[in-house]
Amino acid sequence: MASSVVLLTVLVVAAMAQEDLASAADTKRANLRIIRGQDAQEGQFPWQAWIECIRFNFLASSCGGSLITAIHILTATHCVNSILLCQVSLGLISLDKKGYSYFVHPSNMIIYDNKGQRYVDDIAIIRLNSPVRLTENIQPIRLPQEFQNSGTLSGLTAIVSGWGKTSDNETGLHKFLQYAKVKIMLQNRCSNFYLNNFSLMITNGQICTDFSSSNVCNGDSGGPLVILEKDNKWTLIGIVSLGVSPCEGGTPSIYTAVSAYLRWIYQNINN
């Protein structure tokens, strides 16, 4: 889809202190993207949403999201917090082609109240003005049916998808939707890494993936982390939330664990 606003990419330099991580999150975490991914095929990820938001008349964030009903999209809080307007597009694999687009005002955004805490509860719901017409290329993804985090999912392979650069040296958005296989890592291992290097505690409401072959980077925040269940159906388990630059530096990525917020999600989509 050709964007109606100029795309901005804000890069961040990694640092080994909590205040540097905070600075990275404030300026860049809304722009995580896929590293070492593959081009997606049409209809492969029909729940994938593309979200562009403006603040103070300039582009504030370019993010992913997941269609969970015909009218609701799940994304990250930091993608939509304090914005003026968002454009949500569905049914895309190439940003050069038009999909189904909706303009969404803040009144249609439900942001989880994290009581001022940083790097936690990074989840929000976007409500479209009208239901989207479901097609082969536009379908909601299933939510988890039970609690799932790194403790219960460690060792499993998941898939993350989004648009963006495929290396630290690339600039700008990637033309085609990318996806990559990532392995869910042990909660303790991820917690130890972030606690030792950034004084950041990983909670039960978060999922970590390691950098064994692929990773997220600038531009894919809010996007889906999914697994294929035993019944051969895809389930949304995570929302891309936080990472550290350089993206190819071998550091774990953090996702919001969707299952930890199921009650809140259902309360809001059923109202």
Image: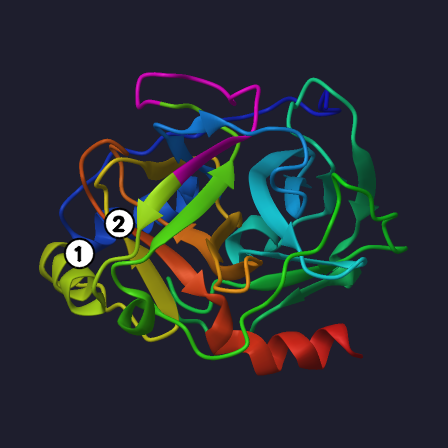
Image height of 255 relative to 134, above or below: below
- Main SS category, magenta section: loop
Name the residue carrying label 2.
21
Give the residue type at disc 1.
Answer: Phe
Give the residue type at disc 2.
Answer: Leu
Quick check: 65 left or right of 135? Answer: left
Residue found at x 75% / y 44%: 138
Q: Where is residue 159 in the image (x, y as percent from the top left)?
A: 43, 46
Q: Does the magenta stretch include residue 168?
A: yes
Most foreground residue, 131 or 80: 131
Q: Position of residue 1 (x, y in %)?
A: 72, 24
Residue found at x 14% / y 62%: 189
Q: In which quarter of the image is the C terminus?
A: bottom right
Q: Are marks 1 and 2 in contact (CB under 8 Å)?
A: yes
Q: How crowded is mark 2: few (under 14 residues within 10 Å), some or many (20 or more)?
A: many
Quick check: 104 left or right of 120? Answer: right
Name the residue carrying label 1.
198
Q: Which residue lies furthest to the left in this view?
A: 196
Q: Is residue 245 magenta?
A: no
State which region is magenta. 167-180
Image height of 52 relative to 115, above or below: above
Q: Can the viewer see residue 39? A: yes
Earlier in the chain: of badge 1 and badge 2, it is 2
Quick check: 149 left or right of 100? Answer: left
Identify the image quadrant of residue 144. bottom right
Q: Where is residue 77 in the image (x, y as percent from the top left)?
A: 54, 58
